[in-house]
Image (cartoon, rainbow, N blue to C red):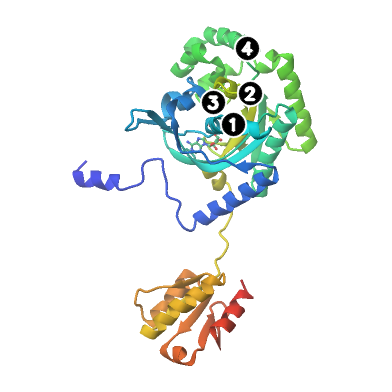
């Protein structure tokens, strides 16, 4: 590569990241507003944590055997010699913030949400990015299965309220520290018998975390895993009752779901309920959202014994499923010619804006006609015309661009006419 090409590449967005440009950003704003409004109706409050955390938070929280921690984290040593990581997910950050500020002492249970960027150094492809965005919700100190069902119902409502229909909700229970080791042993024994047929990654998982073999995307591994034992038969009475409770409450909500005994999810912290919503018309990256219960994280962080449950939805994947259109903007474009008109344009734009009307004045020195075509191109609803004569009279012209009609009046009367129509 020539140095010229190298410098060009470096001036492009980093691989796996993307700009959200005007035109698209309005859709993001709509989705963010809809999400925040919905979560607040369910009693959640926003909690904003930093983008960087100590690396150890994710090693301990997300889990040392996960792909995220072993392969995908953006980690660097800062100037103070500390190992810092750009958060690959949000759940450990919320748990940390609760402990750091002892939010639990203000009263439990607690419900938090957040929308923001996450970072994972995975191979970029459609639906998989290195900087992506998640809508995240977490509930702490609610162990009743009714909350598991409520969260799944809320995830479903979120998608339906945005017009998403082609999805399937999968649920499972991955047991707890009491019953999962027995299942892992059984699974390890089965996987070991077919070791040679498994991919290298799965052969390693036999030792580290055999449940994660169910996560493998390699077709031959998936085929072998079909004959492995399923966790459902190994759940302890507590986990089994909890899972029955989740299904009972979920049935009450009417949300359609399918029990998928192989849904283990790629993070180490899950206990009991796990769930995922998949895009039925999606390709490889078909999980729109995923979550579950993580009852040991707080304890493992050295905090109080507070259980947790939550989910995160990928905003890029969600938006790709929507057919939302930005609302048309209704704004005034001010056409002005001459020094006195320019000064008046500045004054009237300020008046209009202070009265809540979106108003655009440009100072590029274009002629009258060219300003009109600019207004047209930008899609202005009205054009306010200010020439020398208008300034002298104190009366201005307002053109309705859609109707093609024009009225004359004082700034106040024109403003009133506009306000009546936005
Ligand atoms: P996750 O399954 O790793 O869970 O991610 C949740 C969602 O984030 C995925 O379903 C997907 O939509 C989106 N996502 C993940 N990675 C990428 C990527 N590289 N590019 C685009 N979108 C992506 C978690 O992150 C857990 N913290 C969820 C949770 C919250 N569990 C309990 N509370």
**Mark 4 or 1, nearer chain start:** 1
> How dense is the environment of label 2, judged by Cα within 10 Å: few (below 14), some, or many (20 and up)?
many
Along the polypeptide, which appears first: circle 3 or circle 2? 3
Asked which secondary structure carries label 1, the reply is loop
Q: Which residue is mark 3?
A: 266
Q: Residue at x 45, y 88 (%)?
A: 391
Question: What residue would you read off at disc 1?
Answer: 102
Earlier residue among tags 4 and 2: 4
- The answer to the question of whether label 3 and label 2 lie on touching residues, with beta carbons closer than 8 A, is no
Q: Circle 2 is placed at which residue position?
A: 295
How far apart marks 4 and 1 lie (CA) works out to 36 Å
**In the picture, residue 224 is in which quadrant?**
top right
**Is there any visible trace of residue 165 in the rendered image?**
no
Residue 180 image point, x, y percent: 63, 14
- Position above or below: 26 against 209: below
* Residue drawn at the location 57% of the way across and 49% of the way down: 32
Instruction: Please tell me whether mark 3 or mark 1 is closer to you in this view.
Output: 1
Q: Nearer the viewer, mark 4 or mark 1?
A: 1
Q: Could you say which disc has been placed on residue 183 in the image?
A: 4
Task: Give the CA distance from mark 2 to mark 1.
Answer: 18 Å
Q: CA distance from mark 3 to mark 1?
A: 29 Å
Residue nearer the viewer, 43 or 247 = 43
Left-right relation of 74 to 163? left
Displayed-image quarter of ligand 1: top right
């Amino acid at each position: 590569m020539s140095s010229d090409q190298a410098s060009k590449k470096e001036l492009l967005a980093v691989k796996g990241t993307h700009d959200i440009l005007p035109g698209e950003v309005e859709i993001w704003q709509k989705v963010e507003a809809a999400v925040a409004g919905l979560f607040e109706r369910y009693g959640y409050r926003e909690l904003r944590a930093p983008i960087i955390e100590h690396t150890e938070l994710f090693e301990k929280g997300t889990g040392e055997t996960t792909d995220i921690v072993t392969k995908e984290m953006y980690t660097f040593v800062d100037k103070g010699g500390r190992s810092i990581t750009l958060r690959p997910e949000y759940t450990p950050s919320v748990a940390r913030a609760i402990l750091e500020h002892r939010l639990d002492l203000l009263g439990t249970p607690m419900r938090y949400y957040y929308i923001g960027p996450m970072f994972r150094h995975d191979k970029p492809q459609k639906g998989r990015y290195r900087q992506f965005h998640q809508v995240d919700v977490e509930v702490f100190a609610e162990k009743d299965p009714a909350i598991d069902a409520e969260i799944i119902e809320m995830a479903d409502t979120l998608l339906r309220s945005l017009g998403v229909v082609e999805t399937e909700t999968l649920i499972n229970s991955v047991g707890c520290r009491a019953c999962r080791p027995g299942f892992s042993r059984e699974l390890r024994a089965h996987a070991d018998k077919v070791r040679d047929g498994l991919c290298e990654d799965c052969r390693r998982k036999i030792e580290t975390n055999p449940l994660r073999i169910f996560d493998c995307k390699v077709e031959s591994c998936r085929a072998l895993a079909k004959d492995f034992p399923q966790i459902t038969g190994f759940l302890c009475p507590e986990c089994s009752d909890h899972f029955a409770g989740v299904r009972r409450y979920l049935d009450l909500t009417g949300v359609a779901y399918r029990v998928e005994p192989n849904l283990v999810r790629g993070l180490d912290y899950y206990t009991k309920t796990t769930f995922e919503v998949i895009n039925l018309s999606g390709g490889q990256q078909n999980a729109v959202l995923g979550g579950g219960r993580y009852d040991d994280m707080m304890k493992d962080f050295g905090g109080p014994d507070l259980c947790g449950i939550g989910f995160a939805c990928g905003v890029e994947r969600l938006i790709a499923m929507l057919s939302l259109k930005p609302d048309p903007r209704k704004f005034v474009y001010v056409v002005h010619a001459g020094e006195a008109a320019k000064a008046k344009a500045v004054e009237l734009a300020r008046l209009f804006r202070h009265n809540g009307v979106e108003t655009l004045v440009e100072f590029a020195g274009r002629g009258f006609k060219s300003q009109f075509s600019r207004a047209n191109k930008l899609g202005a609803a009205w054009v306010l015309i200010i020439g020398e004569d208008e300034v002298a009279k104190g009366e201005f012209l307002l053109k309705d661009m859609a109707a093609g009609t024009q009225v004359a009046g004082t700034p106040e009367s024109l403003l009133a006419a506009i306000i009546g129509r936005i």
